[in-house]
């Protein structure tokens, strides 16, 4: 029996993950689901955004799926107690260093993109973001007061050869099963870590992946190219900071951020962490109007990458595509369906 740890979290998280539970019960009768508080609600109830018990349960599960964390009510909490700190701690504990963020434009939604249909129709990009290193984790960091009374903030961007190589290997392996092209993005023209990144990726490609097409692109140029000609990309691999930015930009090419899932993976045999990338959306939380498709598609990725059921992943992906093709829409993508009604539409097609 496979095990899934469900972390609904904050804001719209509980609403969208409820639809995941409905879908999972339709698809699988041998999946054991445990549910725990996580993020802001865990801080409120248990004094920490990630408890030791939840962390240990995550490490012993086959997969972890979360809804969202954060909200304005926790903005004044100590930095190490904020919901986002719990998420960073969970990623670190699980050692999930490769964040996979697909940006797929469903044909039925091509007109919902902020770009013209002819630019985004057929879009299928996989962004592989390094997740446990870089500026979000580097030291020293902090805010200090200088002798003249000014305040100075410090964040440190740092990468090692092994950190760059392992996430790049993931990207090359993914490309072999897609269109066989990797674009590596950094700022080697002005950053030492960017120069190291380019050198390590180049060397790995030469040694083990010469059959895959590799191109290097400065991250700012990649941001421009994503809105100029996004279909030139197949797999993009980049660091934590640039991956955070570029993947959110790519998300909007598809017609709505409520459609996009993600998978965070580590070494083979380790549990993966799956989450929609839309955030907690506190402005609509509790209204029952959130789009559950990103959460449902995150479960589709869990079926494929951690639960060993690619057949069911294909079935679920087809059900989502069919629902959209038939006109099923939540408010964020121009429709009127509630969260539960959108879940109903997917269930009808399973």
Image: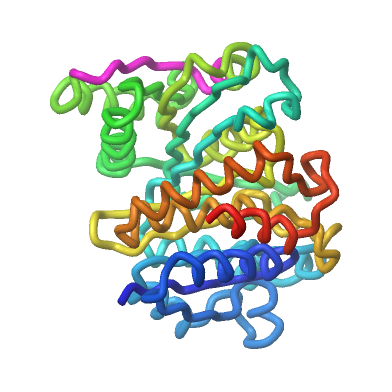
Indicate whether 74 appears above or below 118. below
Indicate whether 2 appears above or below 112. below
Q: Residue at x 67, y 63 (%)?
A: 16
> Front-most of 348 and 183?
348
Percent of width and height locating residue 298? 51, 54
> Front-most of 105 and 95?
105
Q: Residue at x 57, y 56 (%)?
A: 296
- Judge whether residue 144 can be spotted in this image: no
Which of the 4 quarters of the picture holds residue 284? bottom right
Which of the 4 quarters of the picture holds residue 69? bottom right
- Judge whether residue 262 can be spotted in this image: yes
Instruction: Name the colour scheme.
Output: rainbow
Query: What's the magenta region?
Result: 211-222
Q: Residue at x 75, y 24 (%)?
A: 114
Percent of width and height locating residue 84? 62, 62
Q: Residue at x 42, y 47 (%)?
A: 314
Magenta stretch: residue 260 in it? no
Indicate whether 264 appears above or below 183. below
């Amino acid at each position: 029996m496979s095990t899934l740890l469900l972390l609904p979290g904050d804001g719209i998280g509980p609403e969208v993950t409820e639809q995941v539970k409905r879908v999972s019960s339709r698809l699988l009768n041998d999946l054991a689901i445990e549910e725990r508080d996580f993020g802001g609600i865990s801080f409120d109830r248990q004094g920490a955004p990630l408890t030791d018990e939840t962390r240990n349960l995550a490490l012993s599960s086959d997969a972890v799926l979360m809804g969202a964390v954060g909200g304005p009510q926790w903005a004044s909490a100590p930095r190490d107690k904020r919901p986002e700190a719990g998420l960073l701690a969970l990623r670190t504990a699980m050692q999930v260093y490769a964040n996979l963020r697909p940006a797929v434009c469903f044909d039925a939604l091509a007109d919902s993109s902020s770009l013209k249909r002819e630019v985004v129709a057929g879009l299928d990009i996989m962004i592989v973001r390094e997740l446990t290193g870089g500026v979000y984790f580097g030291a020293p960091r902090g805010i200090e007061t200088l002798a003249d009374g000014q305040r100075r903030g410090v964040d440190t961007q740092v990468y090692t050869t092994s950190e760059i190589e392992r996430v790049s290997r993931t990207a090359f392996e993914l490309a072999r099963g897609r269109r066989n092209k990797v674009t590596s993005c950094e700022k080697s023209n002005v950053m030492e870590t960017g120069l190291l990144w380019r050198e390590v990726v180049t060397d790995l490609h030469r040694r083990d992946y010469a059959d895959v097409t590799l191109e290097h692109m400065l991250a700012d140029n990649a941001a421009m190219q994503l809105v100029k000609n996004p279909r030139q990309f197949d797999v993009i691999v980049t660091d934590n900071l640039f991956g955070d930015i570029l993947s959110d930009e790519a998300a909007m090419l598809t017609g709505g951020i409520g459609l996009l899932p993600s998978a965070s993976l580590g070494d083979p045999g380790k549990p993966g962490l799956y989450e929609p990338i839309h955030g907690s959306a506190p402005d609509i939380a509790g209204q029952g109007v959130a789009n559950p498709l990103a959460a449902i598609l995150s479960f589709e990725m869990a079926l494929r990458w951690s639960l060993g059921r690619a057949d069911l992943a294909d079935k679920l992906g087809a059900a989502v595509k069919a629902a959209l093709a038939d006109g099923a829409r939540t408010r964020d993508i121009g429709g009127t369906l509630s969260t539960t009604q959108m879940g109903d539409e997917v269930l009808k097609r399973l």
